[in-house]
Image: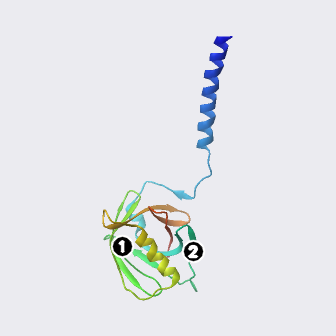
Amino acid sequence: MVVFFIFCRKVCKRLFLAFALLFLGCSEESPWIHNDFDPSNIIGEWSVVRIKLNGSIFLEESKENNPIIRIKFQDRATFTGQTSKNFFKGTYQSKTDLLLVTDFSTSEVLDTDFGNKFYMVFEGAFNNMTNRQEFEYIFSTQGLLVKSNVGDELLLRIID
């Protein structure tokens, strides 16, 4: 009887582990793709279509296919862009799935609410230790998701 009890315990443990692994392995497919990263994929002109700031989501309010915020990543590790009121530019590095903004400057005209939230995402991503903005980014069918370490996000779509 004792041998049978020990045998059942071992078998039950193994079955539990097998089902646990199977359960953890089965999840909804994420639309975000952590593919083998190619930094050149970011090169091009993008529009900001959604901002997540402090847990709240804000959608672009563009008129007549004219995006409010545009960013153009160039192949010389520079970028330029504009909100509806300001121009900005800077330099970046892309490593694995990280976007490191090493220099960022902008004109300083009072911007729209959406433009201000865009700048707030950049401010929140600033790392005082490295003196740069640090983002993780992920490609998907929805676009390019750029996430700061404090949970703020920008969703960008390529402009044709």
Q: Which mark is residue 105?
A: none
Q: CA distance from mark 1 to mark 2?
A: 27 Å
Kindly report which numbered mark, 1 or 2, lies closer to the viewer in this rendering. 2
Relative side of 28 to 148, left or right = right
Relative side of 53 to 10, left or right = left
Say which quarter of the image contains residue 93: bottom left
**x, y percent for residue 56:** 57, 70
Give the residue type at disc 2.
Phe
Instruction: Tell me the SS state at disc 1.
Output: loop
Residue 67 in sight: no
Instruction: Tell me the SS state at disc 2.
Output: strand
**x, y percent for residue 69:** 48, 80
Q: Are marks 1 and 2 in contact (CB under 8 Å)?
A: no
Say which quarter of the image contains residue 63: bottom right
Give the residue type at disc 1.
Gln
Q: Which mark is residue 74?
A: 1
Relative side of 53 to 95, left or right = right
Is residue 85 placed above or below 74 in the rendered structure? below
**In front: 97, or 121?**
121
Residue 150 in sight: yes
Furthest residue toward right: 1
Seen at 40% across and 69% down, the residue is 43
Is residue 29 placed above or below 147 in the rendered structure? above
In this picture the colour scheme is rainbow
**x, y percent for residue 62:** 56, 83
Relative side of 83 to 11, left or right = left
Identify the residue position indicated by label 2 in the image. Answer: 58
- How many C-alpha atoms fall within 10 Å of the one at disc 1: few (<14), some, or many (≥20)? some
The N terminus sits in image quarter: top right
Q: Earlier in the sequence, mark 1 or mark 2?
A: 2
**x, y percent for residue 21:** 58, 37
